[in-house]
Image: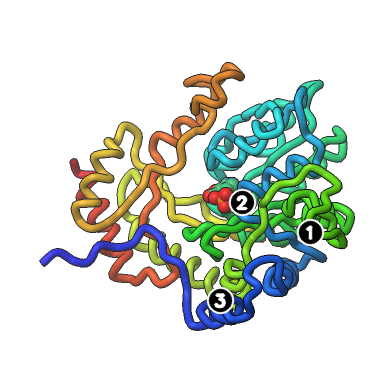
Amino acid sequence: MSPEPLPLAKPVIGAEEEELVLEVLRSGQLSLGPMGRRFEEVFAAWLGVDDAVSMSSGTTALHLGVRALGWGPGDEVVLSPFTFVASANCLLYEGVKPVFADIDPVTLNLEPATAEAAISADTAGLLPIDIFGYPSDMAGFERIAAERGLGLLEDSAQALGAIDGEGRKAGSRGNLAVFAFYANKQMTTGEGGMIIPRDAAEAERLRSERNQGRAVDMDWLDHDRLGFNYRLSDVAAAIGVAQVAKLDRILADRAAAAALYAEHLGGIEGIELPAPDTGQTRRSWFVYPVRLPEGSDRDGIIGKLAGSGIPAKAYLPAIHLFPQFEQFGYGQGDFPVAEGVAARSMALPFYGDLSEADASRVANALEEALKG
Ligand SMILES: Cc1ncc(COP(=O)(O)O)c(C=O)c1O
């Protein structure tokens, strides 16, 4: 009998989430009620910031971040092409040109010096992304942004709980920063996102824009600016409140799962594991990506793993090759590091209660699949 298939990802949902969701359902206030505010408060307290504004997704949070920075037609924003597509789509929503620059082969993030080299007279901002939960060198980005008068939007969607080289939590440095809570993230609300405003006026504007442009003190059908429906429901917020309460444990469990993988996969020849933490830097474990040896048949390996009940996924693509960015003239060969990593990178099953037996099973199956 073949063993049970492993999940690719698994949310940590328990009685606390169920109770708080029931509380909302029984209250009759399923949106714009007190649970939404409570979620923002506990999240901001956990992160160590003054305020946090919930959104319907990480993507909508990014969109309002772009608007808050005033980026628009004629502007360029510099970012990595090795990311989830929403990091750049949010620029297209506002007519901003994404200017991609290649990644560091170790951290897989865009480094400040490379971003600086891509700055032109039209550059309005920088959009660092903490890919695979590895925190960007935000001190470096902040210095460039200050020197050049640029806006900064930190996409920490994959990095809740990461600690940067200065010992600070990703998204807590006073820049506009965004988190995402899709079900495979460290914490989830099913769908959802959060944006960290720079000050109270910005928080007010974000709350208005997510709610059809209505000011907090306005009547139902009064609107004083262009807005959207980017609200998070109170049902989702209830899940978020319960998740924040257990977030430290979730993060610790994921780090322990990653350590198990490092132990079991470390001996497989040719496999590159995620970059280790250095100094004060601590990755927040979102996925467990490995890089296969040059020239491997990744699809074939994924197929073989699937045959052993082990889901694995090619992850991530280099997004500058997607059709919506063709208009800017991007093509194959523009960013060799990102393209090379994208061709060899693969995410393995990953969740906090990954057991020693799971890690060993994945490692054995991968070793077997690599033999061809
Ligand atoms: C780096 C990055 N940015 C943005 C997003 C968008 O978040 P959402 O899926 O909640 O819209 C994601 C989601 O995976 C992401 O990984």
Closer to the camera in the image, 219 or 287: 219
Mark 3 or mark 1, earlier in chain? 3
| Residue in view at x 56 percent, y 76 percent | 21
Q: Nearer the viewer, mark 2 or mark 1?
A: 1
The residue pinned by badge 2 equals 58
Q: Respond yes or no on whether mark 1 lies under 8 Å from ligand 1.
A: no
Q: With respect to residue 38, does 131 lie above or below?
A: above
- Local secondary structure at mark 2: helix
Q: Residue 364, position in %: x, y?
A: 24, 58
Q: Residue 365, position in %: x, y?
A: 23, 55
Q: With respect to residue 93, does 309 lie above or below?
A: below
Closer to the camera in the image, 224 or 102: 224
- Local secondary structure at mark 1: loop
Mark 2 burial class by Cα count in 10 Å: few <14, some 14-19, many 20+ = many
Do tag 3 and tag 1 residues touch (Cβ < 8 Å)?
Answer: no
| Residue in view at x 81 percent, y 21 percent | 121
The residue pinned by badge 1 equals 220
- Local secondary structure at mark 3: helix
Quadrant showing the N terminus: bottom left
Mark 1 burial class by Cα count in 10 Å: few <14, some 14-19, many 20+ = few
Mark 2 or mark 3, earlier in chain? 3
Mark 3 burial class by Cα count in 10 Å: few <14, some 14-19, many 20+ = many
- Residue type at the position of mark 3: Val
| Residue in view at x 34 percent, y 56 percent | 265
Q: Which label was assigned to residue 369?
A: none
Q: Does residue 278 appear in this view?
A: no
Q: With respect to residue 339, does 201 lie above or below?
A: below
Q: Is residue 272 left or right of residue 20?
A: left
Q: Which label was assigned to residue 21?
A: 3
